[in-house]
Amino acid sequence: MANKLVERSVLNLLVAVICIGFIISTASAIRRSSRDVPEWPSSDAIGFANPDNELTNDKRVVKVRDGVHVAIGYALANMILLEGTDGIIIVDTTENSAAALEIYDQFRNITTKPLKGIIMTHSHADHIYGATALLNKTGNSAQVNVYMHSSSETLLKKSKRMQKRSFAGSSRQLGYYLATAVDDVESGIDLGTDHGPDVVATIAEPTHTFDKEATYELAGIKFTLIHTPGETDDQITVWIPEWKVVLPADNIYQSFPNLYAIRGTAPRSLDQWYGSLDKVRRLHAEHMVPCHTRPVSGAENIYDIITTYRDAIQFIDDQTLRQLNKGVTFDEVAEIVKLPPILASHPYMKEIYGVVSWSVRAAYNAQVGWFDGNPVNLNPLSNKKRAEKQVEFARLNLCNPISMIVNLVTKARNILEMVSKDSEEKGQIFMDELQWALELSSTALDAASLSSPFRKLAKQVKIAALRALGNASKNANARNYYLTSALELEGLELKKSSKAQAAFLRTIRVDYIMYTFPSRLIAEICNDTMVMTVIFEFPDVDQTHSYTLRHCVLDYVTDREFIPETSDAKLTMTSSVWKDILTQQRSVENAFATGDLILEGGLQPYQIFMDLTKEE
Ligand SMILES: [Zn+2]
């Protein structure tokens, strides 16, 4: 009873503070509206200029090396000219005819050799829609080879089903209607031409498609097209071995990668993306010409840039997965997963096109879908319904010195009673009321500090709301979810026993176990400048697993062709001995002493590896 009085008096004080705050902010808003309202639009509301911005949108044709030029700043994407002995090949064609033809005219100042081929690196609009105009320009388009990946046609077809939504989303993301802002916005992609509502899109049919990899010779240029899914599933990389030139399409550019496009796309597969960059990295190109932003030269420089880029993508993938396993919710995960300083400070990691937090949410979503596991979000109210309830709740409670939490308990109880009486006729209305009680009690619990006298009560109300929802749910999965979530709030821990875990570990293949280590890396205790390699060799199953720690990412390789030749520690043992060690039936030292483990290099790198990946 005494506790209740304390709770109530503290809550009354809280409500009084809210009310006073509300009155003050309302008063100041009124004062502002009468005197100091800024004019709209203010000058800094339109775009922004960054003095450090080197990614200007000036139109220019850059010579990369003999035979390779790139046009930057004419369109969303670059257009690349490859000049051979008796003809030219164009790689990507921008998003509209006008830009493609303008660039083509510029290229004509470099060479007048005939157009022999067009390579379209993927099916995104900014790479393909100018192709038809180029083909028409030749007067004999049948003589021009057009290359695309074999999956592009299907993707194009599917994209047509989303046409309206895609255009609306792209208009917002790319600012089609913001003509005055385009030049001022620092962007990882070059903006400059018309790509808005009046542009007529045309699609050129490919004459050559391939699946994994294909080598062609055209205009005296020998080139290999490599399927490198990443930014899209049909992405291809163009490799010209004789010139040591690689065109990685949109899998890399001078900005943090757009791992999730807010214009509305399906989640992009991150492990596929950094896996593709590994393929590009291993080409050891001397020139790299991406389809957005500027080209780069110097083999070492290019290798380092691609390594950093792929590590950043793997970091997002692994750390998001790790937090998901730890039970971190969707709304919290983007606040927790941050790039380590060594990655965040890299010039290619500026968040001027892609954004880390969006990417983390997308990575989370890609693993578990739209439902983040939080029962509050299982059947959320629509924004409109919530707004109506918020207004009503505020009207009844905001400045009423009665405990809001007590109101909630009473309300939840009343609704539960009503549902049991009349659920058939008014089912959805009551479910909405229960959901509303759950949302409010959950908000109260989130807001209450650990020492708050209201925390316990908020928790009890939330449990009551979950139980009410669970008991009222006709769907078996929803019922189980709500009721189990209530038990968890009461202290239930959802975890397999260590005995069952150990037994399972013994039965599964060792490569299943080894595959989990990168996403177990505890980034918070990792030194982001540390580089080391630890290799595990299991002769009984003929497997080698290599982990290179770099940028707080474990670069995991099992293909013996790419396993590093040297390591800081190499452990050779049977998979059975390794499982004994993992299940703590014996120690590494014991296995070493009995000759069951051969250790090359030091034990310390192994210990660092194990500390960084220990089960959380
Ligand atoms: Zn693009």
Image: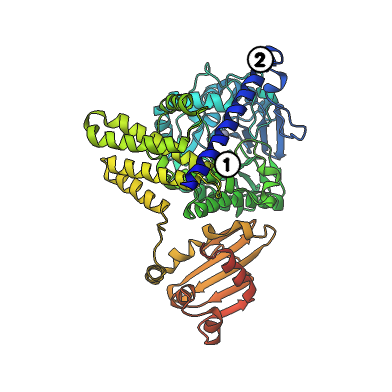
Residue at the extreme top of the image, as rendered: 34
Q: Position of residue 385 (x, y in %)?
A: 40, 26
- With 172 as the anchor, is 112 left or right in this view? right
Q: Secondary structure at mark 1?
A: helix
Q: Is residue 57 visible?
A: yes
- With 4 as the anchor, is 312 left or right in this view? right
Q: Position of residue 268 (x, y in %)?
A: 49, 42
Figure quadrant, ligand 1:
top right
Count of numbered circles on the image: 2
Q: Position of residue 452 (x, y in %)?
A: 54, 46
Q: Residues within 10 Å of mark 2 (few under 14, many from 20)?
A: few
Q: Which mark is residue 33?
A: 2
Amino acid type, callout 1: Ser
Q: Residues within 10 Å of mark 1 (few under 14, many from 20)?
A: some
**Contact, mark 1 vs mark 2 (Cβ under 8 Å):** no
Amino acid type, callout 2: Ser
> Which of the 4 image quarters holds residue 28?
top right
Q: Is residue 225 visible?
A: no
Which of 583/275 is in front?
583
Q: Position of residue 258 (x, y in %)?
A: 57, 39
State the residue at coordinates (51%, 37%): 122
Q: Which residue is mark 1?
A: 357
Q: Which mark is residue 37?
A: none
